[in-house]
Image (cartoon, coloured by chain):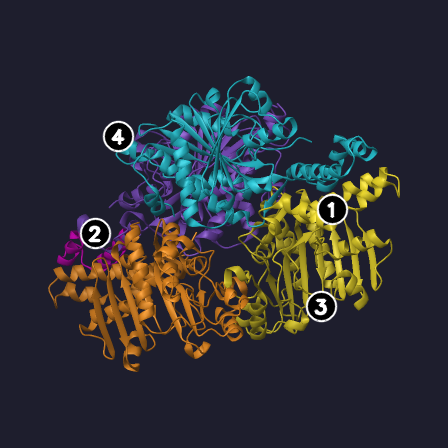
Chain colours: A purple, B orange, C yellow, D cyan
Amino acid sequence: MEIRTDLAIENRELYKEEKNEEVPGVEVKKEEGQDYTVTKVNILNHVGAKIMCKPEGLYITIEVPKLKNTDQELREEISKLLAKEIKGMGYNDKHTKTLIVGLGNWKVTPDSLGPKVIDRVMVTRQFFIAYNKDEDETVANVSALSPGVMGLTGIETGEIIKGIVEKTKPDLVVAVDALASRKMERVNTTIQITDTGINPGSGLGNRRIGLNKDYLGVPVLAVGVPTVVDAATMISDTMDMIIGSMKDKAIVGGEFYSLLDDISREEKYHLIKEVLEPYMPNVVVTPKEIDLIIDDLSIIIANGLNIALHHGIDLKDVNRYIR
Amino acid sequence: MEIRTDLAIENRELYKEEKNEEVPGVEVKKEEGQDYTVTKVNILNHVGAKIMCKPEGLYITIEVPKLKNTDQELREEISKLLAKEIKGMGYNDKHTKTLIVGLGNWKVTPDSLGPKVIDRVMVTRQFFIAYNKDEDETVANVSALSPGVMGLTGIETGEIIKGIVEKTKPDLVVAVDALASRKMERVNTTIQITDTGINPGSGLGNRRIGLNKDYLGVPVLAVGVPTVVDAATMISDTMDMIIGSMKDKAIVGGEFYSLLDDISREEKYHLIKEVLEPYMPNVVVTPKEIDLIIDDLSIIIANGLNIALHHGIDLKDVNRYIR
Amino acid sequence: MEIRTDLAIENRELYKEEKNEEVPGVEVKKEEGQDYTVTKVNILNHVGAKIMCKPEGLYITIEVPKLKNTDQELREEISKLLAKEIKGMGYNDKHTKTLIVGLGNWKVTPDSLGPKVIDRVMVTRQFFIAYNKDEDETVANVSALSPGVMGLTGIETGEIIKGIVEKTKPDLVVAVDALASRKMERVNTTIQITDTGINPGSGLGNRRIGLNKDYLGVPVLAVGVPTVVDAATMISDTMDMIIGSMKDKAIVGGEFYSLLDDISREEKYHLIKEVLEPYMPNVVVTPKEIDLIIDDLSIIIANGLNIALHHGIDLKDVNRYIR
Amino acid sequence: MEIRTDLAIENRELYKEEKNEEVPGVEVKKEEGQDYTVTKVNILNHVGAKIMCKPEGLYITIEVPKLKNTDQELREEISKLLAKEIKGMGYNDKHTKTLIVGLGNWKVTPDSLGPKVIDRVMVTRQFFIAYNKDEDETVANVSALSPGVMGLTGIETGEIIKGIVEKTKPDLVVAVDALASRKMERVNTTIQITDTGINPGSGLGNRRIGLNKDYLGVPVLAVGVPTVVDAATMISDTMDMIIGSMKDKAIVGGEFYSLLDDISREEKYHLIKEVLEPYMPNVVVTPKEIDLIIDDLSIIIANGLNIALHHGIDLKDVNRYIR
């Protein structure tokens, strides 16, 4: 019964909880703002990659505990921060042709973040073609698409994107996806940006083919927000907590203590199964108003992308642009 | 940290788990079909009502474990069964004027069952008025409305409905609502019908004003399906299960056993709070594809109501009618 | 084959085209802004009312030819202008309890303006109730509802609203509705405000019961935007134009001239019927992107209402509030 | 001011109205059913192609005047008829891998037919891949996609489809699109099937790149339904009708007659412009309830495709499958 998380900071947290040391092969930097924390986890080599179960590369996490409330000023600040971090990664300038890809299923609310962001990004490639231009004072060349999920199209998302990349030859792909977190407190309050793209098994949709530089031939930035906690993960963590809290009371080495240690993975698994049947692998924990929250998040992310990708666009323009 | 459930059979189950006896003042009958169980819980007096935390009256629960799969034949069977049970309650015949009310918030997926059912019921009152008729060979006089929730309208649902009841004078109100269950296995597989209406605190929306005969002056049937488990309830139940499983291994009366008994309500509450913050009271557990499931359920319920209320309509007509 | 219009300025225009004089019993004032014209048509008595086919009262029309383009500044200016005109009518102050009603069918795009405005207005009545307040520094007491159309609910819109008015006792009702214009140039560029409420036969939905002070017992302001031209009206006008253009060339009193005069109402009617069958009475002319235009208009109207009704709210707050 | 139509039978009609003879290089066959007419227009050579402004190939038109009403039996009959005609063209059998493409803009109701059909077709390619199968007893290998329009994605529809065709190598592409008709009576009552694919300028979206065998390298069937009449076309036709009706009364060769002939194209154009400004090129005439009609049509078309493409699927299965 593995812990299910798409956040690098949570993989690191899990390691540190167990080993009480920093993950080897991983460099971590933190910056604190008034309302947010930015954590940059850099997986430097294959040792770090193996422990973290994630490819080498940079994972920037923006945590904004208050993001769930509807404070417009903070939201705008986070859009700007997201734009700054994306630009800071150095993959785009005003000549960069970018394809934004909204992953996920628009018919499944917690998985609809990607498609909803696509609805709100500024798409300009058609004007570059119509006016036969190579650059523009205000905007860069951006196209955008929500390919749908394999259950709807019969086609792997990766195949669709690769076909389009080959035809339209962007310099950069930005993939937006809904993620799973291990902790409720990170749900809808955390944005992860990585230059390693989308990798097999990640995201709510459990992608089979990765969307990364190896596969697509151009750099792939992935921007994700955890929108759910996997229910099995939550129950497993809850059980660990209660066992831990009993251990605190028991005498180390005593009978009860070892009894507590005895609760096997298998026992836990059966318990989780019992609680979650008949839906087991597909049960998620979300705030009730997830529909509204996803709407809000998609505006924050789309604003961030609009500012990051278009050199002459700031938040004022963006607010006007987005319906 | 109370167990949150809107199902009478679960209130009964909780009592029986603790006391190992039937609830006094309550009569229970069970019928088994091949793919379903119908349980009729009749709360006969105020003793039963107090223990069950529910008003006196009849609670019919249809449990269909396979309902989550898309077997069209079974769905149609359940629509017919639902119609049969509603008609069996004896509140309507071909002269009955019925107002169907879809409770819940159409912007919050798990709470949107009521409004989605309203979208699919056959509404006929306008024809009775246009042709100045009192009865018809095929259909009864039915109107339908989704009043929205107080957060959207600023008006208590009960006030809106009472205003309309006073103007249009139906003989019967049928209220459809999304419920909370205690157990995942009942989510989206269970239909509860009751002649006690909707009572304060029930449903996902935690209604403040009840919709019942006392308030509206006409009988109110409530039809509900649990679409979520409250996350706090699930975690609380999970903790009880793991403690129970440890107790099974410990020696009764031994030190460890009493340690397990010692885990106080307060400790549990703090644990739940820690797991669920910052959303605490509004976190729900649902299958990921809840959007699609609610769509399917709304067809089953609407079909059942169409057959139950209109004397000359059967499933074939109904399939043709609903888009 | 009558000309179908819900705009008072068009009824006046028709009279003036024919009679070449101002409508008796009607007073007209015009104000020109840089990008808009405000025309105030005041029907003073029953003579004016009869000619205009509209009840006595004030009809304010804001015409903004450029409104169809997406210039955010102009839209905000129009929201403020709408607010100013509504407040200028003198029906509300900070103590006024207002019920906003969104008329129309949310399943029929050109008729969905009312419901979409309701989605975006600030609703506050629930807080006045929760905190047991009579007034507030910033906001007035506002509730809002889209009752649906009779085809969906089986209940006359008027009955639903009257029931709710009796229960919640607002001081003012504001009804928002989609209208029909006679001319394409006014579609989606014109806002009409009137203190005569909604009258039978008006709006895209052809309401049967009026929503006005007589019926509801409180003043009713109606805010409407023409979203279509009735196709029969357009064809009829087109025919008149071509006949007119031929008359200009013919010799007055000549054979051909009289031939043109000879084209009877009946002939015209048959021609229109031939062109529009099989849909005849339900064919409308709209810009192709009506879905997006209605979305934009609903924001402009909702913003205007939010500023008009809430004394401490300005456009900045409103932009932040609306999703 | 050209007549705008995407229907081959209307191009033919226009020629015949003027010349009173069959189009040279074109073969026409008609079959009459009780409730429908099937017209097969075969453009045999470049002479026919030039006159018809359409590529050589077969154009099958199913006209069903009663289709606008909600008679379920007739709809099912038309789905079966559509399936028969598609199969009869001989492009697919149980081994054929088909990619269905839904053209058009899901945000513009009359242009949303393609995407709505995609929502309802049976997609199976993922199972063929998962089970590594080449054929199946019941279903053929079908994938499906709505690429969006260039205004939303920045990418020509053709480029997206070509990229996907190159990656997934289907044997056949079926493109579904909303069309423009010249006559209201054909709107939403007519289905055109052609083996010439989608050609530049056709459809509501006025595609720039064609989707045909030349471009994609595999046969392309196009299935379309006219959902609008272009407003300029309707007005132009109306003017011709009224002039025609006056000519009938005038003496041939007389003064008035030649006056009528005198009404120049330019005059007509200015009149149309005056009527339709400010929207001119984007004004369409549709029945008011176009939203509901498109929903119904998408089911009929999707059903037809499901039966045509999957050898072991009939209407009963299909009704169960589609939500």
Pointer 1 chain? C
- Asked if badges 2 and 3 are on one and the same chain, I answer no
Q: Which residue is mark 3?
A: C91
- Asked if badges 4 and 1 are on one and the same chain, I answer no
Amino acid type indicated by mark 1: Asp
User: Which of pointers 1 and 3 lies earlier in the amino acid sequence?
Assistant: 3
Q: Which of the two discs, 4 and 2, sits closer to the camera? A: 4
Under circle 1, the secondary element is helix
Q: Which residue is mark 1?
A: C237
Magenta range is: A236-263
Q: Is residue A253 on the magenta stretch?
A: yes
Amino acid type indicated by mark 2: Lys
Give me the residue at 81% from left, 66% from top. Answer: C47
- Examine the image and state in which quarter residue B80 appears: bottom left
Q: Is residue A169 visible?
A: no
Q: Which residue is mark 2?
A: A268
- State left or right for residue B145 relative to residue B202: right
Q: Which of the two discs, 1 and 2, sits closer to the camera? A: 1
Q: Counting other residues with Cα less than 10 Å from the Cα at mark 4, is it few (<14), some (14-19), or many (20 or more)?
A: few
- Asked if badges 1 and 3 are on one and the same chain, I answer yes
- State left or right for residue C51 relative to residue A111: right
